[in-house]
Image: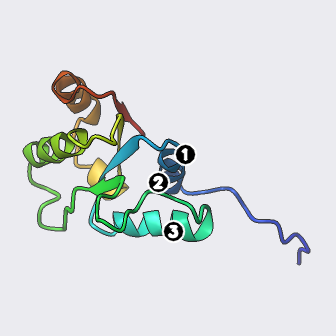
Amino acid sequence: MTDDYTLSLNLPFSIGVYVAVNALPDAFLFMDAPSCAIAKAKYVYGNHDLMSTLLDKSGCHRVVDSSVNICTIPIGRDEDTKKRLRKVASLEACQVILISAFHLTEITGIQYDALARQMEPELKKPVLICG
């Protein structure tokens, strides 16, 4: 038995990405994941930063998910991903876009780095890959 009651800071990778985005007030995160990706933003607020701005009461969250589901994960999602990235980049508050993914979507083989290189000139915002 241990008497060590300190909190562990060994966070899962995806939570670390959220914490990093939270620290950058003009950064937005596109998470290729089901809509439960928004719940992780709530985790950051409830456990790490009560002043977190990842979620916004107006609905303009700094975390945007791809809303994939078990039926849409295996099919080509590049066009939908591009559409969502364009929408994020059009927001005045967005100065940089980070892209990450849950493992269940990452294994489908979307080339996020190639997508970012292709879209960066159009988006006129830096696009960074976390993963």
Mark 3 or 1, closer to the camera? 1
Helix, strand or loop for disc 2: helix
Name the residue: 11% across, 45% down.
Answer: 83
126, above or below 72, in the image? above
At which x and y percent is residue 95? 35, 34
Of residue 36 and residue 58, the one placed in the foreground of this image is 58
The label number, if any, that marks residue 23 in the structure image: 1
In space, the residues marked 3 and 1 are separated at their CA atoms by 15 Å
106, above or below 36, in the image? above
> Which residue is tagged 3?
43
**For mark 2, does the 10 Å Cα neighbourhood hold few (<14), some (14 to 19), or many (20 or more) residues?**
some
Mark 2 or 3, closer to the camera? 3
The amino acid marked with disc number 1 is Ala
> Which residue is tagged 2?
14
Q: Quadrant of residue 3?
A: bottom right
Name the residue: 17% across, 45% down.
Answer: 87
**Sequence-first tag of 3 and 1:** 1
At which x and y percent is residue 105? 27, 54
Is mark 1 in CB contact (under 8 Å) with mark 2?
Answer: no
Q: What kind of colouring is applied to the model shown?
A: rainbow
In space, the residues marked 2 and 3 are separated at their CA atoms by 11 Å
The amino acid marked with disc number 3 is Tyr
